[in-house]
Amino acid sequence: MSARPGTRRWLRASLVAGAVVGLATLARADAPSDQYEFFDLTTTVIQDLRTGLYWQRYPPATGVSFAGAAAYCASLVPDGGGPAWRVPSYKELLTLVDESPHTEYTGGQLQQKAIDGNAFPQIPVDLSYVTSSVYPGTPSGYVYTVDFHNGLPGAADATQSFYVRCVY
């Protein structure tokens, strides 16, 4: 039985499209494909299906102190009257670290990032992200931080400037 005219062309196009989809899938960061609720470019809040947490997808690109981070998150209005936004704990923020950093073009240069670039695109990484967890065994006023440039945890004086990604 011979194929109808155009059938081979459709099959070839389908195979090419499948290869493109396969390449796009391989380009994802290292987060498991089922970690986050479905999202698109307009999604501003993303749910981590493994922890149940809802994350601010696009945090402010300006630095704030620890107190400023708490005030900023508290000022956000929850969708549909949900729980109040807050600064994440150290353990919560670490759940966003991607163990296999990727390189992303941001602000006119290539930057290494240790966070899923699809779920959290174009995030600034020149400052650490602050947590609500106080760092023990240091002078008072130190808090845990997470550096999404390399995925490493840290601690810093709470009066320093940090980025914040709110959660509820």
Image: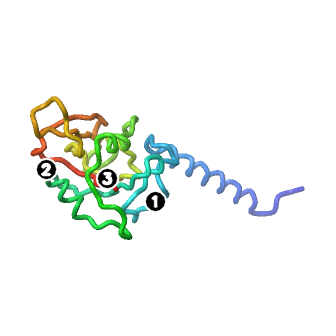
The quadrant of the picture occupied by the N terminus is: bottom right
Write down the quadrant of residue 82 in the picture.
bottom left
Q: Of circles 2 and 3, which is in front?
A: 2
Q: Of circles 3 and 1, which is in front?
A: 1
Between the C-alphas of marks 3 and 1, the distance is: 16 Å
Q: Which residue is mark 1?
A: 39
Q: Could you tell me if residue 103 is visible in this image?
A: no
Q: Residue at x 61, y 51 (%)?
A: 18
Residue farthest toward the right in the current orientation of the protein: 1
| Numbered disc 2: secondary structure | loop
Q: Nearer the viewer, residue 22 or 28?
A: 28
Among the two numbered marks 3 and 1 on one chain, the one whose residue lies closer to the N terminus: 1
Q: Which residue is mark 2?
A: 65
| Numbered disc 3: secondary structure | loop
- Residue 144 at what x, y percent from top left? 22, 38
Q: Residue at x 43, y 55 (%)?
A: 47
- Is there a contact, CB below 8 Å, between mark 1 and mark 2? no
Q: Residue at x 29, y 51 (%)?
A: 123
Residue type at mark 3?
Gln
Among the two numbered marks 1 and 2 on one chain, the one whose residue lies closer to the N terminus: 1
- Residue 76 at what x, y percent from top left? 26, 64
- Residue 34 at what x, y percent from top left? 52, 48
Circle on res. 122: 3
The quadrant of the picture occupied by the C terminus is: bottom left
Residue type at mark 2?
Ser
Between the C-alphas of marks 1 and 2, the distance is: 30 Å
| Left-right relation of 65 to 32 | left
| Left-right relation of 145 to 120 | left
Q: Residue at x 16, y 48 (%)?
A: 66
Q: Nearer the viewer, residue 47 or 29?
A: 47
